[in-house]
Amino acid sequence: MLEISFLFIIFISSILLVSMLLRVKLPISNTNGKSLRWNAELVMKSAPFMAWVEHKKQVKWSNKAVKRTNRQVEALGNAAFTFTDSTQGFSLPRLGLLPQKGSEPRNFNIFTHKINDMDFYFAFANDGAGKSKKPQSQFIQTLSATFAHLQVGIAVFDNKNELSLFNPALSQHLGLRPEWLLKKPNLLSFLDRLRDTNILPEPKSYTSWRKTFHKIERSAMKDDYREDWELPDGRALRVIGRPHPSGTVVFLFEDVTTTLAMERNYRTEVSVYKNTLETATVGFVVFDRNGNSVYSNKRLKQTLGKQCEHTTIQDFSLAMQKAFRPTPAWGDFRQFVLDTSERTSWQADVQTVSGDHVSVNFIPIISGNTLCEFHFPQKINTAINVSLTCAAQ
């Protein structure tokens, strides 16, 4: 920034000198006896930046930097450059590209000033602009190629609420023709189109849903919009809307049909297993590898009551010592739960305080969990056997 400011000051000084020389015909002598006109010409010829004068698009004068940098400028002047914009003026530099033999074009900031019918040009090298734009362009190309191959549909609405970017997956998931998407519809028109094509699931109140999307459009929502859409053709789309402070809104459309089906099957299996355990004639409790209670079934709670409500293996083993006659099994069980080495199942026979014999099995299970199972024979007149299983993880 400091370098640009310095060059700009040189440029202004040069303009003032040239302007004054065009208006003042009399040579003004300095202390060395040399005319100001001669000094100004010497400064302009030796300037480290390119400077040249054109009259009716013909180069009438150029300094040494022009000859040293590129001879095309000496012959063609401003026409030797390629410009990316039409801005031109004293205070607004233009970024011009100057072709180079055997190498990439160089970038120049070009200032223009017109005096009568003469055009004065000053070009300052700005190679950093080309270097910064090249990786930026490469990054955009890489990003675009990545978007094109994503299976997630992407829709980006700019701060004018127009669809400014989308990928092929968006058209595939939503069944919208690319020709229509290229017309840059706004977010609410996009939503209406989805409703008309039966892609958008019919809500209880379409008006309230439209207001929700309008909040997203205005970036007025504090959290992301997230919902799973069940489509009439049996597919399911997970839709995420994410507003950004700049006013841009990004929508992601992911086909989660298989994922949701797997989740439903998993929940069904878990429910079946849980119901099976709850209706079993054995009771059990599960402890994790840290000695915390994970799960206990209905039969266990009916059999032991409050004695099985302890959440840690330490409290549970102490409760068992009170419920049964003295035995080292409960201390061994406590150590067995907290042991992280390779373990094998073992069994112990214990007696209740009333003298009933109970067979207890201690079984290591996956993820460091431990299952403790013990069977309580009921009195003969009950006609059933109640098994109590304690699972320690």
Image: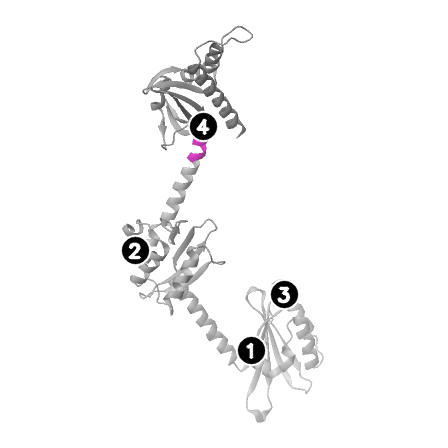
Which three-letter amino acid code belongs to the residue tagged 3? Answer: Asn
Answer with left or right where residue 175 lies relative to residue 210.
left
**Distance CA(mark 4)–CA(mark 1):** 74 Å
- Residues at discs 4 and 2 in contact (Cβ within 8 Å): no
Q: Is residue 239 magenta?
A: no
Front-lying residue, 373 or 127: 127
Which three-letter amino acid code belongs to the residue tagged 4? Answer: Asp
Q: Main secondary structure of the magenta part?
A: helix
Mark identifier at residue 100: none
Front-lying residue, 31 or 59: 31
Residue 148 on image: x %, y %? 36, 48
Residue 95 on image: x %, y %? 41, 30
Residue depicted at x 28% and y 52%: 180
Answer with left or right where residue 339 lies relative to residue 93.
right
The furthest residue to the top: 33
Residue depicted at x 47% and y 20%: 16
Mark identifier at residue 297: 1
Which three-letter amino acid code belongs to the residue tagged 2? Answer: Leu
Labels 1, 2: front one: 2
* Residue under numbered circle 4: 127
**Distance CA(mark 1)–CA(mark 2):** 52 Å
Mark identifier at residue 176: 2
Which three-letter amino acid code belongs to the residue tagged 1? Answer: Asn
Q: Earlier in the sequence, mark 4 or mark 3?
A: 4
